[in-house]
């Protein structure tokens, strides 16, 4: 019988994976529909990061399958999975410290389809994180921990992806910043790209080496 619900965006079926002979994930099945926020909660060392790495292709499966939009993606290299529409934001504030906020965000628009819409995506990110717009020319190293986390998430959004994986979004942040980050994640599923500076160290324009 047809349920009337949309087909899953991400379909994980009986997945097992780990490192060498050590199995971390065993028979994991998850189905996530478009437009939803899905959280995986548990203690450290229980496989949350491993599951995200398996989805992104950094950990190979020993069993099971992973499909994005009905297409199987397990077994593909990470760059092919990213190109298929998966943006993975790892835990921590992994940004390019010597590049400006703008340059960090631009690094997220490396796919051809993303580069063609870079201005639109940039406006989208600045509408979600106004502080990043205010600090566009600042070096990422001069941002607070919460602002660097916003920058890492914003860089992931620049990719125009269908699925956004955010690992440990609140890691090491003050409670008030944690609430701000989670509020942003709550509104992301409603916001679309066509919805319509502070002090600190300035970053010089970045010029690639000759």
Image: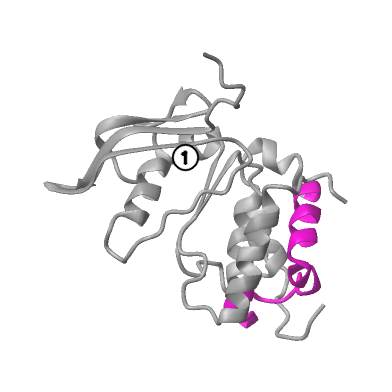
Snapshot quadrant of residue 122: bottom right
Residue furthest to the top in view is 1
Determine whether 35 is above or below 174 in the image.
above
Q: Quadrant of residue 139?
A: bottom right
Residue 7 rendering spot, x and y as whole percentages? 55, 25
Q: Position of residue 121 (x, y in %)?
A: 75, 49
Q: Name the foreground residue: 144 vs 141.
A: 144
Residue occupying image coordinates x 40% and y 49%: 52
Would residue 68 be found to the left or right of residue 204 on screen?
left
> SS class of the residue under badge 1?
helix
Q: Does residue 42 sit above or below 198 in this rendering?
A: above
Question: Does 39 lie within the magenta span?
Answer: no
When asked about the image quadrant of residue 26, the answer is top left
Residue at which label 1 appears: 79
Q: Position of residue 13 (x, y in %)?
A: 34, 31
Image quarter hosting the C terminus: bottom right
Instruction: Name which residue lies at 28% across and 58% down.
Output: 46
Region in magenta: 119-147
Type of colouring: one colour
Q: Residue at x 11, y 46 (%)?
A: 21
């Amino acid at each position: 019988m047809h349920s009337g619900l949309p087909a899953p965006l991400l379909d994980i079926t009986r997945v097992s994976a780990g490192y060498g002979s050590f199995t971390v994930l065993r028979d994991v099945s998850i189905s996530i529909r478009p437009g939803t926020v899905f959280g995986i909660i548990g203690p450290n060392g229980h496989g949350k990061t491993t599951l995200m790495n398996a989805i992104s292709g950094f950990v190979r499966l020993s069993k099971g399958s992973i499909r994005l939009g009905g297409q199987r993606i397990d077994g593909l290299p990470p760059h092919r999975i990213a190109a298929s529409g998966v943006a993975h934001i790892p835990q921590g504030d992994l940004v390019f410290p010597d590049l400006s906020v703008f340059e960090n965000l631009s690094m997220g628009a490396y796919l051809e389809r993303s580069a063609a819409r870079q201005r639109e995506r940039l406006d989208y990110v600045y509408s979600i994180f106004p502080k990043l717009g205010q600090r566009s020319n600042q070096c990422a190293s001069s941002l607070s921990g919460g602002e660097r986390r916003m920058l890492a998430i914003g860089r992931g959004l620049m990719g125009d992806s269908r699925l956004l994986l955010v690992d440990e979004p609140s890691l090491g942040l003050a409670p008030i910043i944690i609430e701000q980050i989670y509020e942003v994640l709550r509104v992301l599923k409603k916001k679309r790209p066509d919805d319509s500076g502070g002090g600190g160290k300035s970053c010089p324009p970045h010029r690639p080496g000759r």
